[in-house]
Amino acid sequence: MAEKASVLLIGSGGVGTIAAVNLERGGLASVTAVLRSNYNIVKESGFDIQSCDHGHLEGWRPSKIINRIPDVAKENLRPFDYIICTTKNLPDIPPTVTDLIRPAVTPGHTAVVLIQNGLNIEKPLLAAFPQNVILSGVSLIGSKEPTPAKILHEFEDQLLVGAFNNPQLDSEHQQSVARKFVEIYSAGGKTKCEYQAKVGWYRWRKLVYNACLNPICAITGLDTGRIRLADGAIAGLLYPAMEEIRAAAKAAGHVLPDDIAHQMLTIEPVELYLSPSMLVDSRKGNFIEVETILGEPLREGRALGVPMPTLSVLYELGRAIQWGRKESRGMVSIPPKQVPGDV
Ligand SMILES: NC(=O)C1=CN([C@@H]2O[C@H](COP(=O)(O)OP(=O)(O)OC[C@H]3O[C@@H](n4cnc5c(N)ncnc54)[C@H](OP(=O)(O)O)[C@@H]3O)[C@@H](O)[C@H]2O)C=CC1
Ligand SMILES: CC(C)(CO)C(=O)C(=O)O
C-alpha cells in the first residue's frame, strides 16, 4: 500500500478541523494538527464535532496533535507533503502566514494549501517559497468553533482547489499537485471537492459574498438570514456592495454573471441564519480579516478606476474595529484620558 500523504494542518478551528476529518476519513493522508488555544482540551478529550456531513463525532482527534510549528530541518523530520493553512489570514497582525509556516516548509517539496478567504493571499508565499507549489482552496462551508474544541458544521463542505500560478514552476506539475490534493481530500466520500483551474475567477466570485455579507453582518451583529430580512438591507446595502465587487472583478479581467449578486445572496436559505466567519470573530472579540477580504479587492478596484463607495465605508469601519482589537491587546498606545480640571 502506498504511503499516506503527510499533512500538517495549521489552524484547527471551524474549517481546518473539518478538513482534517475529511482527510483522515479518506485514508490517504495522515494529519498532524498544530493546535493553540484548544490544545489542552483536545489532548484531554478530543474534539466534539456536530457536522452536517459527518454526523456527531465525540472525542475525535487527527493522527497527531502538537502545540507549536515544527522546524522540519532542525528537528530532522520527514518533510510534509502538504501544509494546509486554515488560520485566519491577517497580514496586518503578526506573525503573517508566511512567517508562521516557514520552519515547516521543505523547499521544493511541500505544497502549501491556503484554504482561506480573500484576495492576493498567495503573493507573499510565492515570494517566500519560489520552489514550492501554492494551492488555492476556495471553501464554501459554514463551520465554527463556538467554544474551544467544539465544532459546529452547518453548511455542506464544498472545496474548489487549483494552483496559484508560480512562474518558477512547470504549470503541468502545479496542476497535478492540485489534482492529487483533490483526490486525497475527496477520498472520504462525504464532501464535494473539485479541481478548478480558474483560481482568480473563483476567488472574486466568492468575494461577492465575503466582502459584503461578512463585514455587514459583523458590523450590524446580524446573521445572514436576519440581514436579508432586515428592512431595506438587501437593496440599500447588500446589492450595492455586491455590484461594486462585480465591477471590480470585471475590471480585473474576471467577468462574473450579471445575476451573481442574487446567486451569492441566495446561496444558502434564509432559515439557516448562518453566522459568517467575520461575525463569529466579531462576537468573540477576535481580529477580523479586513485586509484580505475588504482591503485587497477595494485597492484593486480603485486602481482600475472602479467607484466603490459602499466598500470604502465598510473597509474603514472594518479598520476601526480592527484598531479597537489592537488597542485591547496593547498593540497601539493612545494619549491618556483627560480628567476634567487637569491642566
Ligand atoms: N468558518 C467558515 O465557515 C468559513 C471560513 N473560511 C475561511 O477559512 C479560514 C479559516 O476560518 P475559520 O475556520 O472560520 O477560522 P477559526 O477562527 O475557526 O479557526 C482558526 C484557527 O487557527 C488557529 N490559529 C491561529 N493562529 C495560529 C497559530 N499561530 N498557531 C496555531 N493555530 C493558530 C486558531 O487558534 P486560536 O483559537 O488559538 O486562535 C483557530 O483554531 C479563514 O480565512 C476564513 O475566512 C472560508 C469559508 C467558510
Ligand atoms: C460563505 C461563508 C459564510 C461560508 O462558507 C464564508 O465564507 C465565511 O463564513 O466566511
Image: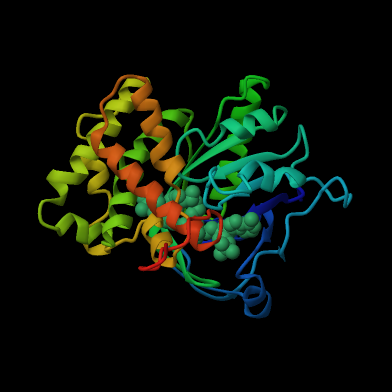
Give percent across and percent down for residue 11: 59, 57
Looking at the picture, tell me which residue is in the foreground, 147 or 320: 320
User: Within the image, what quadrant is residue 33 found in?
Assistant: bottom right
Side of 327 where 75 appears, left or right: right
Q: Is residue 70 visible?
A: yes
The coloring applied to the image is rainbow
Callout count: 0
User: Within the image, what quadrant is residue 112 found in?
Assistant: top right
Give percent across and percent down for residue 9: 64, 54
Side of 121 where 315 appears, left or right: left
Vertical side of 241 occupied by 21: above or below: below
Vertical side of 174 occupied by 229: above or below: below
Side of 322 where 83 appears, left or right: right
User: Within the image, what quadrant is residue 224 found in?
Assistant: bottom left
Give percent across and percent down for residue 203: 42, 35
**Which residue is at 36% across, 39% downward?**
207
Q: Quadrant of the C terminus?
A: bottom left
**Which residue is at 62% across, 24% downward?**
166
* Furthest residue toward left: 231
Give percent across and percent down for residue 257: 25, 29
**Which residue is at 72% across, 39% downward?**
110
Looking at the picture, tell me which residue is in the foreground, 12 or 94: 94
* Furthest residue toward front: 343
Looking at the picture, tell me which residue is in the foreground, 297 or 322: 322
Q: Is residue 18 visible?
A: no
Looking at the picture, tell me which residue is in the foreground, 315 or 119: 315
